[in-house]
Structure formats: C-alpha cells, structure tokens
Image (cartoon, grey):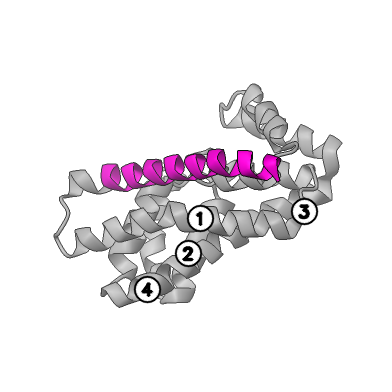
Amino acid sequence: MSDSSYMLDVLPDLAAWGLFGLALCSAIEKLVPILPSIALFLMLGMLGVANPVDLPAVIAVTAAGSTAGSLFWYGIGRWLGPARGDLFVLRMTRRLDIKEEWYLRLKRNYHGHAIRATLFGQLVPIVRAYMALPAGVLAIPAPGFAIATFCGALIWNTPFLVSGYLLRQQILAPDAAAPAAVAAIILVNLLLLALLRFYRPSRSAA
C-alpha cells in the first residue's frame, strides 16, 4: 500500500472527530504533500457535511487547517534562510521528480507580487502544497502570507467540499463531482484576474 492510499484510509477516522478532525485533515494535506488534494476535499465534503448549514463551518475550519499546515512549512523556510532553504527545496524537487526551474520560477514570482502569488498559488495543484517553504525562505511578511493563504484555501476547498456534499446526497454523479469543482475554481480564477486587470489602471491613475 502506498503512503498516500494509507493516509486516505486513515483520514475518515480523523474526520469523525468533528470540526477539529476536519481541520486536522486539511492541515495534513499540506504537511504531507503526497495526498491528492481533490480526492481529500471531496471525501471531507462527503463525511463532514451532513446538511447545508454545516458548510460554512466546514469551509472555514478546513481553510484554517490548510493555512496552519502552510505556516508550518513557512516557519521552516524562515528558520532555514535563503542558502539552506534553497538547498533543502532543490533536494526535495529531485526526490519528488519536480523540475528545479519550477521552484526558481516560483521564487521569481514572489518578488514584488508576494500576496497575489500566494493567493493564486493556492488555486494550483502541487504548487499550493509546496509554495509555503520558499515564501518563508524569502521572508514574505507572515500576516500577508497567512491571509492570502487562508483566502486561497477558501476558494480551493469550497467547490470540492460542496461537490462532496452533493455526492453524499446523490445529487451529483460521481464522475461529475471533480470536473464541476475544477470548473468552479477556474471561473473564480478568471474573475479574480479580471478584477485585478480593472483595478490596476484605476490605482495607477490615482
């Protein structure tokens, strides 16, 4: 049994602990970035949302858990510093078969665009799990990083949790749940990009 399948077998037991368990599951997704995020949050939506009134609390605690997991890696990055942090991340990329250029490009994107890069990074698979450590290495201000991570996690988690609930209620077909959630995230991405485009001229004109 692979590590990721073992963790997915364990997570339902954690989810049974209520809101704390759901927050812990979402934190583990960041702490152990081998779990398929889409499958995790669909499962948490099925297990943790019995009624629509449960959704706001579940969305909030899972976003908080995701943020807590990211802040752990952010703290490791701050502790390591630039030289040791780069060495650590590059070793990780080789072990996980991720191109070094991906990490270097992520670092470049953080310069001058830290909050925006953090927010949008939370909406990209794989990137959302690994971006906290380079943010710490680059000493991105912690409050801004935490807020942007929380907001990005809200946007990412919500469609999958809702789709999981609809699966539980047999309103949504199993093969349509993940594509519907991904489509919602893409739509939000496009809306955010449009808002940024409209906001930028008004700010420069001020």
Q: Residues within 10 Å of mark 4 (few under 14, many from 20)?
A: some
Residue drawn 54% across the image and 41% down it: 198
Amino acid type, label 4: Ala
Amino acid type, label 2: Thr
Earlier-in-chain disc, 1 versus 2: 2
The percent position of residue 128, horizontal first and vertical second, equals 55, 44
* As drawn, 70 above or below 135: below
Disc 1 and disc 2 in contact, CB within 8 angstroms: yes
* As drawn, 114 above or below 29: above
Q: Which residue is mark 3?
A: 141
Q: Is residue 170 left or right of residue 146?
A: left
- Cα–Cα span, label 1 and label 2: 8 Å
- Cα–Cα span, label 3 and label 2: 23 Å
- Cα–Cα span, label 4 and label 3: 35 Å
Disc 2 and disc 4 in contact, CB within 8 angstroms: no
Q: Which residue is mark 2?
A: 62
- Cα–Cα span, label 4 and label 1: 21 Å
- Cα–Cα span, label 2 and label 4: 14 Å
Residue interval drawn in magenta: 178-206
Q: Residues within 10 Å of mark 3 (few under 14, many from 20)?
A: few
Q: Which residue is mark 1?
A: 153
Residue 187 counted in the magenta span: yes
Q: Is residue 71 left or right of residue 52?
A: right
The percent position of residue 133, horizontal first and vertical second, equals 70, 45
Amino acid type, label 1: Ala
The percent position of residue 67, horizontal first and vertical second, equals 59, 59
- Whether residue 1 is visible: no
Earlier-in-chain disc, 1 versus 3: 3
Q: Is residue 196 left or right of residue 21?
A: right
